[in-house]
Amino acid sequence: MTVERKKTITKDILNGALLDSFKKLNPWVMIKNPVMFVVEIGTVITLLLSIAPELFGSTNVGRGYNIAVFLILLFTLLFANFAEALAEGRGKAQADSLRKTKSDTKARLVQKDGTYKEVSSTSLRKGDIVRIEIGEIIPSDGEIIEGLASIDESAITGESAPVIKEAGGDFSSVTGGTRVASDYIVVKIMTDPGESFLDRMIALVEGAKRQKTPNEIALTTLLAVLTLIFLIVIMTMVPMAQYLNVKLEISTLIALLVCLIPTTIGGLLSAIGIAGMDRVTQFNVLAMSGKAVEAAGDIDTMILDKTGTITFGNRMASEFIPVSGTQAKEMTFVALQASVKDETPEGRSIVELANKLGESWQAANYIGSEVVEFSAETRMSGLDLEGGTKVRKGAVDAIRKYVEALGGKIPHDLETISNRIAKAGGTPLAVAMGDRIYGVIYLKDTVKPGLKERFAELRAMGIKTVMCTGDNPLTAATIALEAGVDEFIAEAKPEDKIAAIKKEQQEGKLVAMTGDGTNDAPALAQADVGLAMNSGTMAAKEAANMIDLDSDPTKLLSVISIGKQLLITRGALTTFSIANDIAKYFAIIPAMFILAMPQLQALNIMNLASPESAILSALIFNAIIIPLLIPIAMRGVKYRAMSADRLLSRNILIYGIGGVIVPFIGIKVIDMVLHGLNIV
Ligand SMILES: Nc1ncnc2c1ncn2[C@@H]1O[C@H](COP(=O)(O)OP(=O)(O)OP(=O)(O)O)[C@@H](O)[C@H]1O
Ligand SMILES: [K+]
Ligand SMILES: [Mg+2]
């Protein structure tokens, strides 16, 4: 079952948006948008005046005029609602198809006595153990505790190629709703009902929990203040007009107010934000908040984990190299002993290579032994044998310190061997039994293709890339060069990754971090933008504020562009909207006062047909500019890689000057049409 990714606006989305435009007229919904709420109050008043023109006293205008103002205002509201509904539409459609994926499945619960019991997937809780066979849907999120299988994740990622998942290491998490395509797995459930990844994804794409970002709140406040100022301006016009003996009609005052308050940006603001989030989703990235997307637009530094992020992360043992004085067979056997109980992919690949070289082990010989699991802190793993012998393997410097502490000697060629591996971009793991070092394991990994070009693009945007790895400095340097990052930090423990981020943040920089491992989780949480690879562990995905479903670290580049585009679009349309409103001033004010003060004729540069036509034309223009700008709000203003200052002045020029000129032309054209059709 694949989710159809909605690239375009379909007829269904359009129809849904049309219906929603009316539903959103609900004042309780509208009040969240102060500008449009004021328009709604005006709409209600003009509706009343359309029914009873004399409701608020004697009047010189006819019912027809009031109805015209009412209808234009109603459409202004509907257009703004439509923009928002349309922006929400694609996410809602996607949420619907994800919901189908979530349909109730049966799960095979493993009971305490080892027998199976069939239960509904919705009854599974944290800690339950389930077994999933080939062809079956994984009932909920969890970690594989036994087995290795290829998983079809297309239901969530849209990517049809299955991915390999296995117990231990950074590739052990599975997502509910995906399908086991080969073999079987035993999974420990990690989420309670309703809190799964799919549940969160549905809520996210649907925008159910969408919160205004701090930037949006600030802008909304500014727009509300502007609205209040214009409201006061309009109200002071009433006594002024009385003094001049001009009769100001209520519907005209409302029309003037609506023309002056920033309805264009007020109507498009939330659509711009939703569309920005949606664009991120179209890139197969799940952003937990709009704030994260906006922060991405301002990133200065990007920190990346090496294994699994810059490289594919399937570090495989390719060679056992004994130090001088040690037999190859001996080295292979010690490497095997150090790894028999190591459930990480690295550990298993060592066992495989040793088997291939003819070494095998008997489980019976290891009954009393104790496993020393790998940790990012110690950078070692191994086994304490029954007789007290300790077998270890790990990062070369860690093993060296370990052996030195035991009083052992360091083989003279250890460094040469490990340096050769490191210079080739591989990870050397030293192997020791007791206080003796036997040799080095060569772990190979591959750098993901195309990184260099994308990091160069980041550099052009002024963003620094730093690779942060637990590996040794030589390997790090080789991979850093191959991937084209600006800087690297080697032998980094989890706290060093956080420290690197904090240091940048203290310099006032916004930091993005991408990673996949449990050891990356704290750093992902500390960063302003934390992008977790979907291939990574549950802990990483929970700590991050974005998840890349394709596990491509350079995806952040696209997210950065979208973030910048979002900020630019909002700025450009705000500029346009306010410039527009100023221009409308010159169309309406003369119209209102010309009768009383002929000298104002000088202001009537537009030479409109009649005062009524001027007001209605301005109001119509004010309404239709909203749907005309929907494409820009949805698509975003094109982002070009140039400095922020140049971009800003360029946009102020285009959207500021454009914003002043366009209404003059638009209003004049509408006035001519209305006049030509003999409507006014
Ligand atoms: N199974 C293992 N047993 C022993 N040592 C290991 C094992 N796996 C990795 N190491 C060693 O520990 C180091 C740190 O590994 P880890 O996977 O924590 O790196 P990391 O901090 O995630 O950095 P990155 O993912 O960027 O390489 C590795 O460079 C390697 O030398
Ligand atoms: K306006
Ligand atoms: Mg890692």
Image (cartoon, helix red, strand yellow):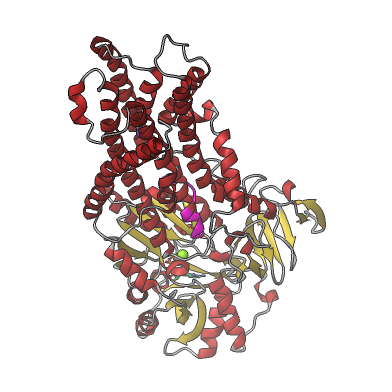
Q: Residue at x 17, y 23 (%)?
A: 599
x, y (%) of residue 367? 67, 70
Of residues 609 and 193, the one drawn nearer to the viewer in this rendering: 609
x, y (%) of residue 134? 74, 68
Q: Is residue 283 magenta?
A: yes
Residue 398 falls in image quadrant: bottom left
Q: Residue at x 68, y 64 (%)?
A: 179
For the C terminus, the quadrant is top left
Of residues 367 and 219, the one drawn nearer to the viewer in this rendering: 219
**Can you see residue 386?**
no
Q: Is residue 328 above or below residue 178?
A: below
Of residues 670 and 327, the one drawn nearer to the viewer in this rendering: 670
Q: Is residue 574 magenta?
A: no
Q: Is residue 40 above or below residue 453?
A: above
For the N terminus, the quadrant is bottom right
Q: Is residue 91 above or below residue 642?
A: above
Q: Is residue 664 above or below residue 446?
A: above
x, y (%) of residue 640? 31, 60
**Can you see residue 652?**
yes
The reply, left or right, for residue 166 in relation to residue 460 is right
x, y (%) of residue 482? 35, 77
Q: Residue at x 31, y 17 (%)?
A: 235
Residue bounds of the magenta highlight: 279-291
Residue 429 falls in image quadrant: bottom left
Residue 464 falls in image quadrant: bottom left
